[in-house]
């Protein structure tokens, strides 16, 4: 095991490129690429990896929610994923979207999930193999999960509002400009229709990338502990909600808090600012 991983609360939730390269042919794993750029997979990908589109495969855009348990089972089945398959996620943007896909798999109760530390960028910069050949994994018969784990790892608007009113920890993982209300979208990204800028009252601004090194790998346990536990004063049993714009960047922070630091009560508010910023009577704050 990578020595950096050993100090994390759940070191089993990460693999590095060396380990994955040596285990690509293992029958019990399925490598999944999930990107912001949905066309990137077709240009090249890790040998044997399948592509799961966070928008087209995991979301029902007619109601702005995730697919049904039956829809999730169909996605897994067509990609050769069984309930006991270890699914290893990776992608672009230092694993934003890979973490989002992993979080969605946990939402449906899939237990064996891991992230490739550093994602697609680190794998490629290390000179590891890439291919344009799409795999043909035999389909499985993944049973529809009995339920989604909405109450455990997901927060909705009403729950986030009560959380704010109770002055429980809220972490805004967007850029400083978004947090202060100077802009309503990520830097260098288009405006997505949010009417107001700012943040949820009482939230602390800790950009997601604070947890990552320049090469997209996660910072050490000691560094992460200083950022979240020491600087924010988060207690071990803290009830935490993280949010961003649509839940993708906050999935990265959710992974850090849950798997690397070991917090057990972390939820992702996936409605995030595109919901809160447009919600009638939802209170906001501006400035630092």
Image (tube, rainbow, N blue to C red):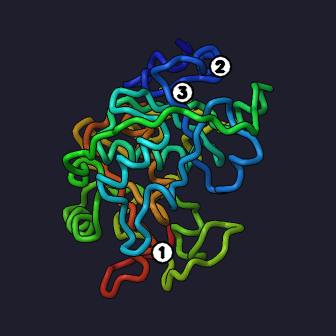
Residue for badge 1: 198
| Helix, strand or loop status at disc 2 | helix
| Marks 2 and 1, how far apart at CA | 43 Å
Q: Which residue is mark 3?
A: 220
Q: Position of residue 180 (x, y in %)?
A: 53, 71
Name the residue nearer the viewer: 172 or 94: 94
**Residue in the picture at 75% in, 34% down:** 131
Residue drawn at x 28%, y 65% is 156
The residue at which mark 2 appears reads as: 21
Q: Is residue 286 above or below residue 203?
A: below
Callout 2: few (<14), some (14-19), or many (20+) C-alpha neighbours within 10 Å?
Answer: some
Please tell me which residue lies in front, 263 or 51. 51
Look at discs 3 and 2 and give the one toward the viewer: 2
* Distance CA(mark 3)–CA(mark 1): 30 Å
**Residue 216, percent across and down?**
65, 38
Contact (CB < 8 A) between labels 2 and 1?
no
Q: Earlier in the sequence, mark 3 or mark 2?
A: 2
* Side of 122 relative to 106 (left or right): right
How far is disc 3 from disc 2 in space, using C-alphas? Answer: 22 Å
**Left or right for 74, reference 40:** left
- Of callouts 3 and 1, which one flags the residue occurring earlier in the amino acid sequence? 1
Q: Residues within 10 Å of mark 1 (few under 14, many from 20)?
A: many
Q: Secondary structure at mark 1?
A: loop
- Which residue is pictured at 42% across the width and 21% down the height? 12
At 62% from the left edge and 56% from the top edge, which residue is drawn? 36
Q: Secondary structure at mark 3?
A: loop
Nearer the observer, 180 or 105: 105
Near-viewer residue (85 or 19): 85
Residue 90 visible within the image = yes
Q: Bin the neighbour count of mark 3 within 10 Å (Cα to Cα): few under 14, some 14-19, many 20 and up.
A: some
Residue 105 shown left or right of residue 213 in the figure: left
Percent across and percent down for residue 53 are 55, 54
């Amino acid at each position: 095991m990578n020595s950096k991983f050993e100090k994390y609360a759940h070191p089993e939730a990460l693999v590095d490129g060396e380990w994955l390269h040596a285990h690509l042919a293992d029958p019990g794993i399925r490598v999944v690429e999930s990107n912001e750029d949905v066309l990137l997979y077709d240009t090249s990908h890790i040998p044997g990896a399948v592509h799961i589109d966070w928008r087209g495969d995991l979301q029902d855009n007619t109601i702005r929610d995730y697919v049904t348990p039956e829809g999730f089972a169909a996605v897994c089945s067509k990609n050769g994923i069984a309930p006991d398959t270890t699914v290893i996620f990776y992608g672009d943007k230092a694993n934003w979207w890979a973490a989002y896909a992993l979080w969605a798999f946990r939402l449906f109760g899939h237990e064996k999930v891991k992230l490739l530390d550093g994602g697609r960028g680190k794998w490629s910069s290390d000179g590891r193999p890439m291919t344009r050949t799409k795999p043909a994994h035999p389909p499985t018969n993944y049973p529809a999960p009995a339920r989604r784990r909405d109450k455990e790892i997901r927060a909705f608007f009403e729950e986030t509002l009560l959380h704010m009113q109770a002055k429980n920890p809220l972490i805004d993982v967007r850029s400083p400009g978004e947090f202060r209300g100077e802009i309503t979208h990520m830097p260098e990204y288009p405006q997505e229709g949010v009417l107001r800028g700012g943040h949820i009252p009482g939230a602390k601004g800790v950009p997601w990338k604070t947890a990552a090194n320049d090469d997209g790998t996660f910072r050490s346990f000691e560094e992460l502990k200083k950022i979240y536990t020491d600087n924010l004063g988060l207690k071990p049993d803290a009830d935490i909600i993280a949010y961003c714009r649509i839940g993708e960047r906050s999935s990265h922070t959710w992974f850090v808090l849950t798997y690397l630091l070991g917090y057990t009560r972390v939820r992702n508010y996936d409605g995030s600012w595109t919901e809160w910023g447009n919600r009638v009577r939802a209170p906001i704050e501006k400035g630092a």
